[in-house]
Image (tube, rainbow, N blue to C red):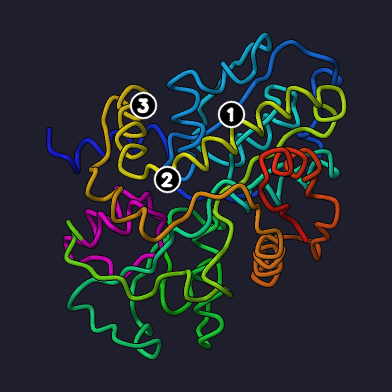
Amino acid sequence: MDYRVKLGIAAALVVFVVGTSAALGDRSLFQPENPGRISDVLRLGYFPNFNHAQAVIGVGNGDYQQALGNIRLETQVFAAGPDAALALYANSIDCAYLGPNPAINGYLKSGESLKVVAGATSGGAVFVVRDGAGIDSPDDFAGKKLASPQLGNTQDVALRHYLQEQGYDVRKIGGDPEIQPTKPADIVTLMADGRLDGAWVPEPWGAHLVREAGAHIFLDERDLWEGGRFSTSLVMCRADFIENNPESVRRLVEAHVDRTVWIGEHREQAIQLFNGEIAKILGTAFNEQDLAMSATRMKFTYDPLEETVVEAADQAYGLGFLDEEPDLSGMFDLRILNEVLAEKGLAAVGR
């Protein structure tokens, strides 16, 4: 089967994004089924995404279950960040890997009952433009057709904020340039056919567009952030689960830190293991050349890069994706992470 067709099938099963942030609806939706309690089970949610590689690999090869010991690991694979955030507050899962924007929305909509306990990735998002689209500078976007994976998702906010900074009209509907929410696999087809001029996408879609769709990278998002570091994936848990099951969370965080360090030291092996697990989950693997190129533009890290999450929330508010000016002062609970890091002789993180 053609690789593009395979990716289209995969995309039908999962929206491959660094984190989606579509509205989670009214706060009334967040009604937990059962109160928190001491549990011998840890229910973990994650996506079959490259920026969730720690979970994909650690769950698949049994490392996470081994780290948890007699605490049984149950997992659920999600296709969108808002679904994972809603499942957290509804007490359907205990912890989850998800992008910054759904984490922000989940925290605000849940009445601050969800907490970030670690980071997962930094970087891995690029603005790609079609060769021959006539885009050579920020002055060339008028009249162009651009895309992002989903209205209000992490890349959509980044694209709109960037264009707004350049003086363009970035209304949710209409505006110039036109921004179309489009599934990543469809972005590939549209750009290859010349019907799309550019797109702000997560990896490995950026690498795939360059290789398959006659495109080039106009902007690496790392260039917009101090030190080239910005959060693209986080680990979040329910506050009541952290309080009632601190040992379970500690073991999960320790496994996450170990896997993060290992991936940084064994990139090629990690890509192969990740892709093998993806094939089991989706029925098709990603192109390893795309993953290898993507890995050069992202970093796996347990640091949640808190200040960049706060800035992303401010950008979303400025674009009208949040109803109120966000206060994330209680969103990060890094006590367990820093205890684990101290035990391993690693530097503490957080503001």
Tag 2 secondary structure: helix
Q: Which mark is residue 265?
A: 2
* Residue in the picture at 36% in, 65% down: 199
Question: Depth-wise, is mark 3 or mark 2 nearer the camera?
Answer: 2
Q: Which mark is residue 277?
A: 3
Crowd around label 3: few <14 · some 14–19 · many ≥20 (10 Å): many
Instruction: Kindly indicate whether the residue at mark 1 contacts the one at mark 2 (C-beta within 8 angstroms).
Output: no
Q: Quadrant of the N terminus?
A: top left
* Residue in the picture at 59% in, 16% down: 74
In the image, 91: left or right of 128?
right
Q: Amino acid at mark 3?
A: Glu
**Label 1 vs 3, first from the N-terminus:** 1
Q: Which residues are magenta?
A: 182-210
Residue 149, image x, y percentages: 43, 54
Above or below 5: residue 152: below
Instruction: Kindly indicate whether the residue at mark 3 contacts the one at mark 1 (C-beta within 8 angstroms).
Output: no
Q: What is the quadrant of residue 34 in the picture? A: top right
**Label 2 vs 1, first from the N-terminus:** 1
Crowd around label 1: few <14 · some 14–19 · many ≥20 (10 Å): many
Query: Is residue 159 covered in magenta?
Result: no
Cα gap from disc 1 to disc 3, whole angstroms: 15 Å
Cα gap from disc 2 to disc 1, whole angstroms: 25 Å
Residue 158, image x, y percentages: 53, 67
Q: What is the quadrant of residue 239 in the picture? A: top right
Residue beneath disc 1: 45
* Residue in the picture at 71% in, 65% down: 307
Above or below 277: residue 350: below
Tag 3 secondary structure: helix
Q: Amino acid at mark 1?
A: Gly
Q: Amino acid at mark 2?
A: Glu
Residue lying furthest front: 345
